[in-house]
Image: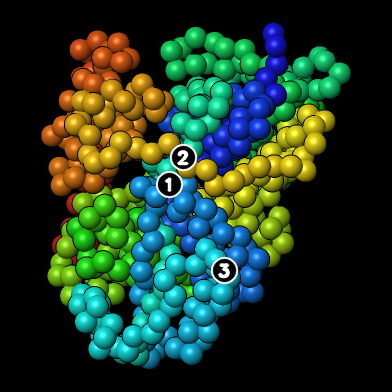
Amino acid sequence: MTPVDLCVLGGGVTGLGLARLAARHGLSVVLVERGDLVSGASSATSHLLHGGLRYLEHGHFALVREALRERAALLRMAPSLAQPVRFLAPVRRSDRVRPWKLRVGLALYDVLAGSGGLSPHAWAGGARAVALEPALSADGLLGCGLYSDAVVDDARLGIAVAEDAAAHGARLMPQAGLVSARPASEPRGGCLLEVRRADGALSQIAARVLVNATGAWSDATRRELLRSLTPGEPDPAPRLAPSRGVHLVYPALTRSHAVISLAADGRAWFVVPFAGRSLVGTTEVVVGSPPPAEAALPTVDEIRYLHAATQRLLPGAGEPRPLAVYSGLRPLLAAEVSGGAASREHAVFDDGAFLSVAGGKYTTFRAIAAEALRHVLARLGRGADRIDDRPVPLPAPAAGEPEPQQAGADAAERQFALRLDDVMRRRTRLWLRDDRGLGVAAQVADGMARRLGWSPERQREERDHYEHLVHTEQDLLARALAAHAPLHDGART
Ligand SMILES: Cc1cc2nc3c(=O)[nH]c(=O)nc-3n(C[C@H](O)[C@H](O)[C@H](O)COP(=O)(O)OP(=O)(O)OC[C@H]3O[C@@H](n4cnc5c(N)ncnc54)[C@H](O)[C@@H]3O)c2cc1C
């Protein structure tokens, strides 16, 4: 069997970014994802391409500068999926951060953005800020900092990265499970993997280099691989401290601005305008590593907490009800590994038989890919000094809202969609419709069926599955927001 240069485990934006860059550098690449592409953290974000304003307080200037550079690159690479957005940052009498401090921070943020800067920061007094966004609470409001970041369609940008990887020869295998791994006998190492494909058949993959890019599940994957590839060694200590983050999706709560607010513990949370809706989040609940099976699921307490915080921040928005909830697990490096408080910084680890890459944020996936590729090229014995990562355009989605049947057909044909919810949730914005896309799900399934050869029974199963997902979510929201429900103190925003 001819080995491929690189096999990547995990089809989030980290794994896809590496697969794309490696394929663009002429490597033969296979990527194995156990679910849908970008079905983990990479479609559960706050939808921001940002430098991370709050890192400035901790002096992480290089991290912020790198992320702002990446923000600028991605705005150029995917203008239909990422656009600048203007933020309001309210400062109230009771806040720890004083107006002068925020203004210094925003000025620094502009400077660090350099030539990739967006509209520069400004200051609006309380009355002007409320005039800009009338829903905003005027209670103790001293004013708002105004600054710019970018909002991104996280799932569809990830899929565009996947399309680009495939266009450069990478073989992407979604819904494929790793069955076994063993060391290759050839002197230069590598490994032999057995993978169960989406169609149920087994595939053998010989890979010169294997990279574990499985996000919050990185410790679990590493343990499984080490047990197979270097048996007899004790299980390694975890490196990650993953945390769950929940978002609520509301009808638009603001006119046009995003809002950043500080939670009691100093963490930032956001109201982000996206596709005519407002995304509100996030919470941060530590889940342990490897995460237990249900760790990614949102809880009633988190939903209540976010809903109450939204009403306090934007009382003028009336009493809107969230129409959707989503959550994901951040693949945060543990403090011992990242060398300080848990941060979004990433690391590439040499695990002997394979490499692991974890941490970072969505915004910096290209920088993470470049660093991981350097390690891969070094293992392959190739020069790693000339990585070409110019911000060339990514494949753009069709303009406008495609007709549902066509959307299903296109997603199955070109975008690796194998289940109906892959299309409803991660290839289109149909899940954000008032009816959550249920009215057109049958047409989407029909379009997919034509490409994937689904029987009528399979189409019905897919529709039932999507309906079940939506109804489970609606039930959870209804339970969480039931009148007079007690608010437990089990979640922090
Ligand atoms: C609530 C929340 C909000 C966030 N907001 C932002 C934001 O606004 N901006 C920003 O820049 N970043 C944000 N982030 C961070 C960002 O989402 C992550 O850093 C990034 O998406 C991580 O990508 P990943 O590919 O490493 O992980 P994931 O996207 O989780 O991908 C890992 C993949 O590995 C797969 N996998 C697991 N085990 C196996 C296995 N054994 N075999 C094969 N596949 C496997 C999983 O199915 C998954 O698809 C946020 C994260 C969260 C959770």
Q: Earlier in the sequence, mark 1 or mark 2?
A: 1
Classify 10 Å Cα crowding around label 3: few (below 14), some (14-19), many (20 and above): few
Depth check, front residue: 259 or 192: 259
Residue lying at 39% horizontally and 25% vertically, measured from the top left? 414
Tell me: 65 left or right of 380: left
> x, y (%) of residue 379?
79, 32
Q: In this figure, which residue is indicated by the disc labeled 1? A: 78
Looking at the rendered structure, the kind of residue marked 2 is Leu
Quick one: SS at disc 3? helix
Locate the N terminus by quadrant. top right
- Disc 2 crowd rating (10 Å Cα; few below 14, some 14-19, many 20+) is many
Question: Distance from label 3 to label 1 (Cα)?
Answer: 20 Å
Which type of secondary structure does the marked residue at label 2 adopt? loop
Q: Which mark is residue 427?
A: none
Quick check: is the Cβ at mark 2 less than 8 Å away from ligand 1? no
Q: Amino acid at mark 3?
A: Gly
Q: Residue furthest right?
A: 187
Residue 63 position by quadrant: bottom right
Q: Which mark is residue 394?
A: 2
x, y percent for residue 107? 52, 80
- Report how far apart the C-alphas of labels 3 and 2 lie in the structure: 23 Å
Is label 1 in a helix, a strand or a loop? loop
Residue nearer the viewer, 264 or 124: 124
**In the image, is residue 435 above or below residue 259?**
above
Q: Mark 1 and 2 residues: CB-CB less than 8 Å, in contact? A: yes
Which mark, by number, is residue 114?
A: 3
State the residue in front, 28 or 471: 28
Contact flag, marks 3 and 1 (Cβ < 8 Å): no
Look at label 1 and name its amino acid: Ala
Q: Is residue 361 left or right of residue 312?
A: right
